[in-house]
Amino acid sequence: PSGVDPAAVVYGGTQLFEKTQNEMKRTSLSISNPVKLIFVHSGKAVESTGEMVQKVAQKHQATDLSETFKAMGKITLQLKNQLQTGKLDGRLLSQNNRLLDTIGVVGKRAQKMISQIENWGGYAKITGAGGVRAGSGWILVFAPNKHTEEKILASGWETFTSTVQ
């Protein structure tokens, strides 16, 4: 276990975790403008986090995913900067999800839901380790306008909202 989940609970707020060669570094982020997010449940993953990590490691051995991991890191830093300046570009979430799909952690059900969210004008990515055989867990969604938010909340999917501040 990385310790990310317990640290987020203990310290609260918005946290950035960066893995260096020797450690996991945690930084509390100061958010300039609150951002409302929606979480959509794609279904419980049947795979454990360990199984998903092993799946990605095997894929990385077969196909070098280093550039994909670097791209994911760049997106994370862009999101951090945007949250701190108050100008969130939701497209980064969708870009990150495409990279997560590339490494093989986004199931078909979650991807179908994310495609629908994007068709409604939203931006989305899975959270956590993902899952492919059934659900992929929770999907993080940024709805840039009221119309998109209403579509998602009226979808019949299990949802909850949260504000990052």
Image: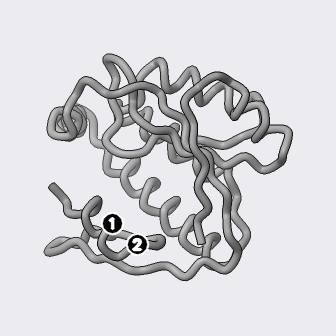
Q: Residues within 10 Å of mark 2 (few under 14, many from 20)?
A: few
Out of 108 and 164, give the one closest to the viewer.
164
Q: How many marks?
A: 2
Residue 165 visible within the image: yes
Question: Which element is circle 1 on?
Answer: helix
Disc assigned to residue 9: 1
For the point 55% across and 43% down, the residue is: 39
Q: CA distance from mark 2 to mark 1?
A: 5 Å
- Looking at the picture, which amino acid does disc 2 mark? Gly
Residue 118 visible within the image: no
For the point 55% across and 82% down, the residue is: 30
Q: Is residue 134 above or below residue 6?
A: above
Which image quarter: residue 8? bottom left
Residue 107, horizontal then vertical, whole percent = 41, 23
Whether residue 76 sits left or right of residue 78 in the image: it is left
Q: Are marks 2 and 1 in contact (CB under 8 Å)?
A: yes
The residue indicated by pointer 2 is: 12
